[in-house]
Amino acid sequence: MAEYYALGAGLPTLRPEIGKNPPLTLREFVETLRGQLTRRDGQLLDLLLLSEDNKALVALLYDRPIPEPQVPYVVGPDRLRKLVAAAERGMITSEMVGEELHFDPKTYPSYLVDFMYEYRHDQEIDRPAEHFYEDILDNYYFRYVMKRGDEFVRTWVSFDRSIRLVLAAITIKRHDLDARRLIVGDSELVRLLRSGNWHDISFLEEGEVVQKVLQISEEEDLSVREHRIDQLKWDYLDSLTFADTFSIDTMLAYLLKLQMLSRWSSLDAEIGKSRFREIIDQLNHESRSDLEKFRAEAKRHNRL
């Protein structure tokens, strides 16, 4: 495993202080890091950055504006548009990836091709998706990372996904929604969350983090709740790298912490409260809209 002594020694210390500007931007850090990585370590970096490509692909499928990325894309909107167009023509193979997207099929994120094949198949036969496509794509991505990542990347992505699954399950329970459609995956945690069997979750490897997320979810102030979730993630990253200073894992942990700080620093000190309220109001509106869409789709699905 390569060690990045010069880079690590020169990085400013990050602290989980909400509202303060990070000492460097995400793009600056990624560009600096990429210029020094070995090929294998560069692939590990890409595994984490692919989350932005996932967001862009979902936006394209739903004809939504592509969100401004936090970090540089791995594939990018232009190639993703070509992928969608190729899928619409029924040309969704690894050979197509190499010929039309000018990407080495051996290094191309193959889960994108697998996902688009399923998406296109549903469209051709006019079959309602069993789950939301965002969740289907996330599950394809998760399985891809579990095969390609090192121990740190696999552990982190699994931990982060567990938090998101539990938060989703809590929302589902509060709104009396169908967990079988809204929770996607094939792990034991997924099975128990879909069945609503919270008691047995405590015996799983993820049991401790589930209990912590449940406690945090009881906080009524959404801002405080979000801060505590990020603190949980921050502490976990520290636990994964406490005896490690200059490896790729530490560099990736630095990136993930920087992402958290960058997200919160967007709330300016003077207008933070008003901007945060605007953001929350928007999220609440979108959540209500998505809830109504889901209920309408569920009724349609049950009639078929």
Image: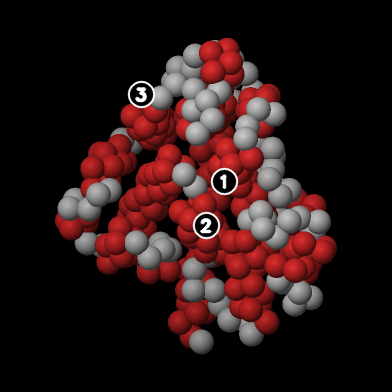
- Amino acid carrying mark 2 in the image: Tyr
Q: Nearer the viewer, mark 2 or mark 3?
A: 3
Residue 152 visible: yes
**Quadrant of residue 86 within the rendered picture:** bottom right
Q: Residue at x 67, y 25 (%)?
A: 32
Closer-to-camera residue (42/239): 42
User: In screen coordinates, is 89 left or right of 188?
Assistant: right
To which residue does mark 1 refer?
A: 47
Label 2 packing within 10 angstroms: few (<14), some (14-19), many (20+): some
- Which percent across, then down, holds residue 196? 26, 62
To which residue does mark 3 refer?
A: 243
Label 3 packing within 10 angstroms: few (<14), some (14-19), many (20+): few
Disc 1 and disc 2 in contact, CB within 8 angstroms: yes
Label 1 packing within 10 angstroms: few (<14), some (14-19), many (20+): many
- Number of numbered discs on residues: 3
Q: Residue at x 69, y 38 (%)?
A: 72
Q: Secondary structure at mark 3?
A: loop
Position of residue 238 relative to residue 130, above or below, is above
> Alpha carbon of mark 2 to alpha carbon of mark 3: how far?
28 Å
To which residue does mark 2 refer?
A: 144
- Amino acid carrying mark 3 in the image: Ala
